[in-house]
Image (tube, rainbow, N blue to C red):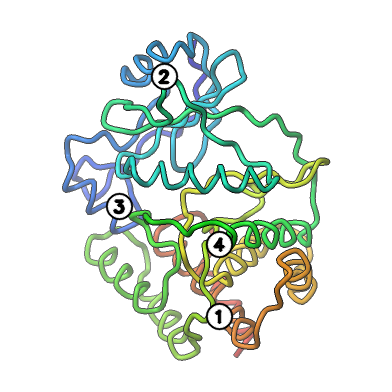
């Protein structure tokens, strides 16, 4: 039995019969591969076949997730993840290698398991993996704990060979990338009120601080992916893993906190928590970058339509540092 996640229906893009996709590069990929099913349901024939092939059924519980299909299977002991169709097998193997390296250093990360000598499996036109279900009870952690968890992750990532693959969607973006994506989405009618965003991108460009220190980073380190528990942090969703400025991860975490109800956290306290855990101080240039990188994060999410409120956050940040 499949227990599905709630659904609100499918939105169509520009009358082409395609799902609404905010990211211009992903939308282009879907156009080039009309035979690939972009959205995959838990009861899709390919999923059911793989569950039978790996003897993981019959019951499966949909754990939801914004990017990929995540099913709790194997009597609740395992998770089957079926990736979006543009995620390649080399990319998945690369992420598995890094997750295994993190687990060896004591971080709580789910490491995919081998079945029949394989750790990556065909699921229709997609690739899938199976990993243990990490039983965890999230606590209401303080923002400083999130940044400490991020510092520990960065320190562990530095000990590993960097990723050799990249995602179709860039993790780190600069003003020129944002302009290109805005132009493409505007031309295709995939964004509302683009004229509101262009001046903010231009202002961001005037203040931009080029990247200084790069290293492997998580790419999407908000509270749902770095979950606080009584036994310490649990790390999820490494799909955005990339070699990029470490300050980009800090900027993503800062930007998400600004969407959280309640008083604004003290950036200095967050950075101190990060530095202690990373055992590495932020440079003056990195601190300058952290005044503008959260704006780029918010504008990227606004252009791609990934949630509400990002335009307001970008505008407020620009005004705060004017």
Residue in the image at 18% along x and 47% along y: 31
CA distance for labels 4 and 3? 22 Å
Q: Are marks 3 and 2 in contact (CB under 8 Å)?
A: no
Instruction: Looking at the image, tell me whether mark 3 or mark 1 is earlier in sequence order.
Output: 3
Q: CA distance from mark 2 to mark 4?
A: 46 Å
Asked if marks 3 and 1 touch (Cβ < 8 Å), the reply is no
Find residue 171 and report its horizontal and vertical position in percent: 44, 62
Q: Position of residue 95 (x, y in %)?
A: 46, 46
Q: Residue at x 45, y 91 (%)?
A: 206
Identify the element where label 1 is drawn. Answer: loop
- In the foreground, 217 or 305: 217
Of residues 71 and 191, the one nearer the viewer is 71
The mark that comes first in sequence, 1 or 2, is 2
Q: Which mark is residue 316?
A: none
> Where residue 26 is drawn, which disc sits there?
3
Vertical side of 288 occupied by 16: above or below: above
- Is the C-beta separation of discs 1 and 4 under 8 Å? no
Disc 1 and disc 2 in contact, CB within 8 angstroms: no
Q: Which residue is mark 1?
A: 292
Q: Residue furthest right?
A: 230
The local secondary structure at tag 3 comes to: helix
């Amino acid at each position: 039995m499949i227990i599905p996640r709630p659904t609100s229906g499918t939105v169509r893009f520009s009358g082409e019969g395609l799902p609404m996709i905010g990211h211009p590069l992903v939308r282009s990929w879907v156009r080039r591969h009309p035979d690939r099913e972009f959205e995959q349901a838990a009861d899709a024939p390919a999923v059911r076949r793989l569950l039978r092939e790996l003897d993981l059924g019959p019951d499966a519980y949909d754990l939801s997730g914004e990017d990929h299909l995540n099913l709790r299977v194997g009597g609740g002991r395992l998770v089957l993840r079926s990736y979006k169709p543009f995620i390649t097998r080399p990319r998945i193997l690369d992420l598995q290698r890094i997750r295994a390296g993190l687990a060896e250093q004591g971080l709580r990360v789910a490491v995919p398991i081998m079945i029949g000598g394989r750790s990556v499996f065909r699921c229709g036109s997609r690739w899938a993996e199976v990993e243990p279900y990490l039983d965890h009870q999230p606590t209401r952690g303080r923002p400083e704990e999130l940044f400490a968890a991020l510092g520990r992750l960065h320190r562990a990532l530095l000990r590993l060979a960097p990723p050799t693959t990249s995602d179709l969607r860039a993790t780190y973006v600069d003003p020129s990338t944002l302009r290109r994506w805005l132009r493409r989405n505007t031309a295709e009618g995939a964004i509302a009120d683009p004229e509101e965003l262009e001046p903010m991108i231009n202002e961001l460009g005037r203040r931009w601080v080029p990247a200084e220190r790069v290293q492997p980073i998580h790419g999407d380190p908000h509270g749902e992916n770095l979950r606080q528990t009584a036994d310490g942090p649990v790390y999820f969703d490494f799909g955005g893993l990339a070699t990029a400025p470490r300050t980009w991860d800090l900027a993503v975490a800062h930007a998400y906190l600004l969407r959280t109800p309640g008083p604004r956290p003290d950036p200095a306290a967050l950075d101190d928590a990060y530095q202690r855990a990373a055992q590495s101080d932020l440079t003056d240039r990195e601190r300058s970058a952290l005044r503008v990188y959260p704006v780029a994060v918010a504008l990227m999410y606004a252009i791609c339509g990934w949630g509400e409120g990002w335009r307001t956050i970008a505008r407020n940040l620009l005004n705060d540092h004017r």
